[in-house]
Image (cartoon, helix red, strand yellow):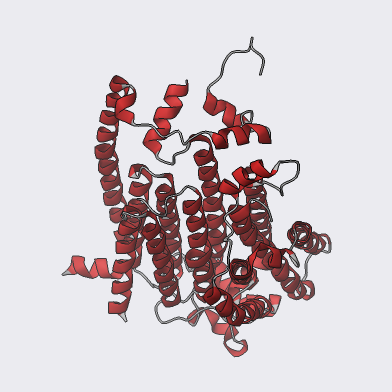
């Protein structure tokens, strides 16, 4: 179990470092959604199922969509 | 703005709302090409100053972050161990909620019992924050309909404000026909079962809004507007806040009591769900089209 | 060996503060406004992770209290307070980021760019 936890935590840090550094802005948003999904698994491990449900719906879903729509509006989906 | 008045910065004017006061000004701006500039070509001396400032800025911020990291790690390593039952965070407050929460509020889920009754005022403020956030985004992005503009101007406006795709993706439409009912059903289950299982108003509102967003994306604005027009949207989110405030005010006026506490969780749960759902869907809709 | 054990004991807290610093760094160093907002969201999540990990107790389960266990509930369930606080915090964090994104859209509409360097320059030139 502790190996899984360490793997997830390392993945969290990697996602956090890489997400805003990605060359295309769209990849940044997708990596941020991945960050949200990993966080929701971490919350299941921390025995907080309420948080896991909310994070899966908001952190991975709604926030990602809002970022995507903004990128589309400021025309940053194609170039970096 | 009169001529005799002192000329303020354009940025200040924009913040004060003098620049974009009416539609004509916006249309004029829309015809202009994008005002992108090359920093080096523009004003060489100033530009160089700016660049050197940014170079030093990178170094200084990295240094600051490293110092912060060292301090944080030092503090964190001196905290009590992770998962220690004797840690000072697990004090008599949480003991009270766990041992007596069930019999006093009648809710098996201690988290729901806590945030809707013991800390009900906190959550009421939270709902107000959500309501205000939706209103603030509406102030910034609201572009209702196409009233009083010519066809040419409408096209120009659409370029920026309207991101609705012209044709529907077949795959998305067919998939969402299967998925949306289940998502909504699960949202309702989480909303109603929030008392005795994981969930509650916040989670359920998020799931319901996710289902609504998928529906809107698959079938378009016209399909959603049939049951969630702007009037209904405003009604639902105001009603949610009113139910919450009313129930809580009644609870305070009647001096609480255990018999009453077990009945206020369900209405507050539903009210919070309504507010959260409308807020999230409103964000998406305003971002996509500038109207509900 | 002792030090390694301490690090493993505090793995969640260490991750949380690292995430916080990473988010702060992105927020200060990225040039595009959208990426700054992503950094801000990472900082938010870091604080939530720290709070939630403080409420966890090894071997205990989520606080769905059963009737016959209610008297000795403290021995079976984790601390519900951090979970409740974070639950409301997540929803507020999404509204904060939605507001910032709306501001970014307005800025793009006005200045035609979302790059902080160009924005500073444009504002300086305009007065």
Residue at x-position 41% and y-position 59%: A29
- On the question of residue A4 being in view, the answer is yes
Query: Is residue C10 at all visible to an observer of this figure?
Result: no
Asked whether B144 or B186 is in front, the reply is: B144
Find residue B51 and report its horizontal and vertical position in percent: 28, 30
Left or right: A29 with respect to B164?
Answer: left
Quadrant assignment, res B4: top right
Name the one closer to the observer, A27 or A51: A27
What x and y, as percent, mark residue B233? 74, 60
Give the answer, above or below, for where B106 lies relative to C42: below
Q: x, y percentage for residue B239?
A: 78, 61
Front residue of B192 and B219: B219
Q: Give the residue drawn at x 65%, y 52%.
A: B134
Q: Residue furthest bottom?
A: C68
Is residue A37 toward the left or the right of residue C107 in the image? left
Is residue B19 depicted above or below B221 in this figure? Answer: above
- Taking the image as shown, residue C6 lies to the left or right of residue B106, namely left
Residue nearer the viewer, C65 or B99? C65
Identity of the residue drawn at 25% across and 34% down: B55
Compared to residue B211, the image places residue B14 above or below, namely: above
Q: Quadrant of residue B109?
A: bottom right
Considering every residue shown, the one lying at the far left of the view is: C1
Location of the N terminus of chain C (image quadrant): bottom left
Question: Which residue, as the protein is rendered here, is positioned at the far top?
Answer: B4
The image position of residue B232, as x and y in percent, is 78, 61
């Amino acid at each position: 179990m502790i190996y899984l936890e360490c793997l997830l935590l390392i993945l969290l840090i990697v996602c956090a470092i890489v997400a805003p550094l990605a060359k295309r802005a769209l990849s940044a948003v997708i990596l941020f959604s991945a960050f949200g999904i990993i966080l929701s698994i971490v919350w299941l491990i921390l025995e907080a199922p309420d948080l896991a449900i909310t994070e899966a719906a908001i952190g991975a879903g709604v926030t990602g969509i809002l970022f995507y729509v903004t990128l589309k509006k400021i025309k940053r989906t194609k170039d970096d | 703005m009169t001529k005799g008045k002192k000329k303020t910065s354009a940025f200040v004017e924009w913040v004060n709302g003098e620049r974009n006061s009416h539609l004509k000004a916006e249309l004029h701006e829309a015809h202009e090409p994008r005002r992108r500039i090359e920093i080096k070509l523009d004003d060489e001396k100033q530009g160089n100053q700016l660049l050197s400032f940014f170079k030093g800025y990178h170094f200084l911020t990295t240094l600051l972050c490293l110092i912060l990291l060292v301090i944080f790690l030092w503090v964190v390593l001196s905290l009590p161990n992770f998962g220690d039952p004797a840690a000072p965070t697990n004090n008599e407050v949480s003991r009270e909620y766990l041992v007596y929460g069930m019999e006093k509020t009648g809710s098996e889920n201690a988290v729901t019992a806590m945030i809707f009754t013991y800390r009900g005022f906190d959550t009421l403020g939270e709902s107000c924050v959500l309501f205000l956030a939706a209103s603030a985004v509406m102030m910034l992005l609201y572009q209702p309909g196409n009233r009083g503009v010519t066809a040419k101007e409408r096209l120009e406006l659409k370029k920026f404000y309207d991101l609705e795709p012209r044709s529907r993706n077949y795959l998305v439409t067919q998939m969402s026909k299967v998925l949306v009912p289940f998502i909504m059903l699960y949202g309702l289950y989480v909303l109603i079962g929030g008392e005795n299982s994981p969930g509650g108003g916040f989670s359920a509102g998020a799931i319901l809004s996710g289902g609504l967003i998928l529906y809107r994306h698959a079938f378009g604005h016209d399909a959603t507007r049939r049951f969630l027009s702007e009037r209904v949207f405003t009604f639902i989110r105001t009603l949610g806040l009113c139910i919450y405030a009313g129930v809580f005010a009644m609870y305070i006026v009647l001096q609480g009591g255990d018999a009453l506490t077990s009945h206020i969780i369900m209405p507050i749960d539903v009210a919070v769900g309504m507010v959260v759902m409308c807020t999230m869907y409103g964000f998406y809709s305003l971002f996509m089209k500038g109207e509900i | 060996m002792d030090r390694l054990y301490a690090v493993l004991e505090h793995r969640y807290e260490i991750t949380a503060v690292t995430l916080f610093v990473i988010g702060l760094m992105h927020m200060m160093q990225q040039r595009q406004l959208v990426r700054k907002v992503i950094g801000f969201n990472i900082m938010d999540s870091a604080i939530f992770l720290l709070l939630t990990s403080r409420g966890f107790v090894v071997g205990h389960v989520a606080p769905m209290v059963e009737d016959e266990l209610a008297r000795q509930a403290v021995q079976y369930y984790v601390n519900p307070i951090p979970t409740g606080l974070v639950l409301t915090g997540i929803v507020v964090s999404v509204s904060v980021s939605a507001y910032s994104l709306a501001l970014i859209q307005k800025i793009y509409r006005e200045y035609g760019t979302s790059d902080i360097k160009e924005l500073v320059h444009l504002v300086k030139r305009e007065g």
